[in-house]
């Protein structure tokens, strides 16, 4: 009797399970996603080489954005240009209700003269701070563009299996806008790139020349540091160098301040739980051997990985500089941030936990690495201040290359193994599909 009463429930349960198994939005990914990613791989390499050979500096990516926009239009996407000067944004609308997933790539090059012996090496010249410079994609932004274009093609071909919308963001000036200009993620957010439609989540990737091809590294919480440039102006009293007692020496005072700043990390920050850096990068004062000047200026950078340390250091750097100066009879004017600053690149822990299975299913568990945080900075953090987001590193180093031979980012020798882009396209695709399925 009990078995007969339970039979309808068992039938319903089996039917529900069968529907979930057959649904393209179930936990198992649509079988054609990786097939399509494999098919687009030759195009991704072609696009990457084009951008590598034709790099442009921040806020000057005119040809780059035109190339991107022209291609996205061939996919039938709704395309907006001129966002934050030279950015491109495209919308893929499935026509069905669901979340809005944003995918972002940065598109600018650097003022670096390329020395890597590539047949498509950059020979481009540009202008940076009034000087003629070489221009190079020395940080892999060319691969970021190509991977996102590849993902756009794959997802467009899978439109019927999507729920919601995908917003493709091709962002200029990640390396910093020219002096006197706004730019990058900050300006994109300011202009409303995360609105109309309102973005629910954002994903971004960075190629790594030190991480083996086929691997992806992640971290929950702070993965890249905040950056706060600072400037300290120490004012004293000028005198002849032969009569220092007649001066209030700003050079000696500045020296004491620099030593004091070094104790912020070693004595004020809890290093068991946090990491931080305070660096003085330049100091200027005086012009003769026998004159004690009236003023000394110094500039530097602050890097932190969580908000409590960030607030503590900003407060303490002002206090130490001003109190030390006062003890010497001088004054110290502290400006922080001095120029552009980036927040912490912070991977939302709940989202990271939710999407970690996607990384494992896409790359294989043995190729998914939990990484230590790095003190480099990324303006992807401005998006994460507004919506939940994940920023991940994808391998771009030939596994046969010794780690100590891998060329660093931002150097003339920088190279990437193009096979690494295959995983990048797949990750962007599967993160989108799985997030839509789960929401």
Image (tube, grey):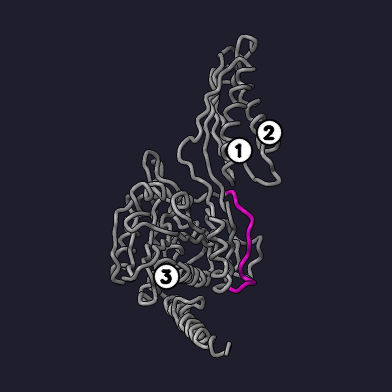
Whole-number angstrom distance, CA of label 2 to CA of label 3? 47 Å
Q: Is there CB contact under 8 Å for labels 1 and 3?
A: no
> What percent of the width, then of the height, locates residue 425?
47, 70
- Locate residue 164, reporting x and y percent: 37, 67
Q: Residues within 10 Å of mark 3 (few under 14, many from 20)?
A: many
In this rendering, the label closer to the viewer, 1 or 3? 3
Question: Residue beneath label 1, please?
Answer: 279
In this rendering, the label closer to the viewer, 1 or 2: 2
The relative height of residue 237 versus residue 189 in the rendered view (above or below) is above
In the image, residue 182 above or below residue 205: above
Name the residue carrying label 2.
Answer: 263
**Residue that carries the numbered disc 3 in the rendered image:** 151
Magenta highlight range: 364-375
Q: In the structure shown, which secondary structural element does the residue marked by tag 3 occupy?
A: helix
Residue 358 visible from this viewpoint? yes
Q: Residues within 10 Å of mark 2 (few under 14, many from 20)?
A: some
Tell me which residue sits at (55%, 30%) in the image: 298
Q: Residue at x 60, y 52 (%)?
A: 374
Are the residues at dot 2 and dot 3 in contact (C-beta closer than 8 Å)? no
Front residue of 206 and 283: 206
List x then y, in percent, for residue 370: 63, 61
- Of label 2 and label 3, which has the lower sequence position? 3
User: Which of these two is toward me, 310 or 65?
Assistant: 310
Q: Earlier in the sequence, mark 1 or mark 2?
A: 2
- Identity of the residue drawn at 39% across and 58% down: 199
Is the residue marked by circle 1 packed among few (<14), some (14-19), or many (20+) residues within 10 Å?
some
Q: How many marks?
A: 3
Q: Quadrant of the N terminus?
A: bottom right
One can see residue 52 in this view: no
Reading the chain from its start, which is encountered first: label 1 or label 3?
3
């Amino acid at each position: 009797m009990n078995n007969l009463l339970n039979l309808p429930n068992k039938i319903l349960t089996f039917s529900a399970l069968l529907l979930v198994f057959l649904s393209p939005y179930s936990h198992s990914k649509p079988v054609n996603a990786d097939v399509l990613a494999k098919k687009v791989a030759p195009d991704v390499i072609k696009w990457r080489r084009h951008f590598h050979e034709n790099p442009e500096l921040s806020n000057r990516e005119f040809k780059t954005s035109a190339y991107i926009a022209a291609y996205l239009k061939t996919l039938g996407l709704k395309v907006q240009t001129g966002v934050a000067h030279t950015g491109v944004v495209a919308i893929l609308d499935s026509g069905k209700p669901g979340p809005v997933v944003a995918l972002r790539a940065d598109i600018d090059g650097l003022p670096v003269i390329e020395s890597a012996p590539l047949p498509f090496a950059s020979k481009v010249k540009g202008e940076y701070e009034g000087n003629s410079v070489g221009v190079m994609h020395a940080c892999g932004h060319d691969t970021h563009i190509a991977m996102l274009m590849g993902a756009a093609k794959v997802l467009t071909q899978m439109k019927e299996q999507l729920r919601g919308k995908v917003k493709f963001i091709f962002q200029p000036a990640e390396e910093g806008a020219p002096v006197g200009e706004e730019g990058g993620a900050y300006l994109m957010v300011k202009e409303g790139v995360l609105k109309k439609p309102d973005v629910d989540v954002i994903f971004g990737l960075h190629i790594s020349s030190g991480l083996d091809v086929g691997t992806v590294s992640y971290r929950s919480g702070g993965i890249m540091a905040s950056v706060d440039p600072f400037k300290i102006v120490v004012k004293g009293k000028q005198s002849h160098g032969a009569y220092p007692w007649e001066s209030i020496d700003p050079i000696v005072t500045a020296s004491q301040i620099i030593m004091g700043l070094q104790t912020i990390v070693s004595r004020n920050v809890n290093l068991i739980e946090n990491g931080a850096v305070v660096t003085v990068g330049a100091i200027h004062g005086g012009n003769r051997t026998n004159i004690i000047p009236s003023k000394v200026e110094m500039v530097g950078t602050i890097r932190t990985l969580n908000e409590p340390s960030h607030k503590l250091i900003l407060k303490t750097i002002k206090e130490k500089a001003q109190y030390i100066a006062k003890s010497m009879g001088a004054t110290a004017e502290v400006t922080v941030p001095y120029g552009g600053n980036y927040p912490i690149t912070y991977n939302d822990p709940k989202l990271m936990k939710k999407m970690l299975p996607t990384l494992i299913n896409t790359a294989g568990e043995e190729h998914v690495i939990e990484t230590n945080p790095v003190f480099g900075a990324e303006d992807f953090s401005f998006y994460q201040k507004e919506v939940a987001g994940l920023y991940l590193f994808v391998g771009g180093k030939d596994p046969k290359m010794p780690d100590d031979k891998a060329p660093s980012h931002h150097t003339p020798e920088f190279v990437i193994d193009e096979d690494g882009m295959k995983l990048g396209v797949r990750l962007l695709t599967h993160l989108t599909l799985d997030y839509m399925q789960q929401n």
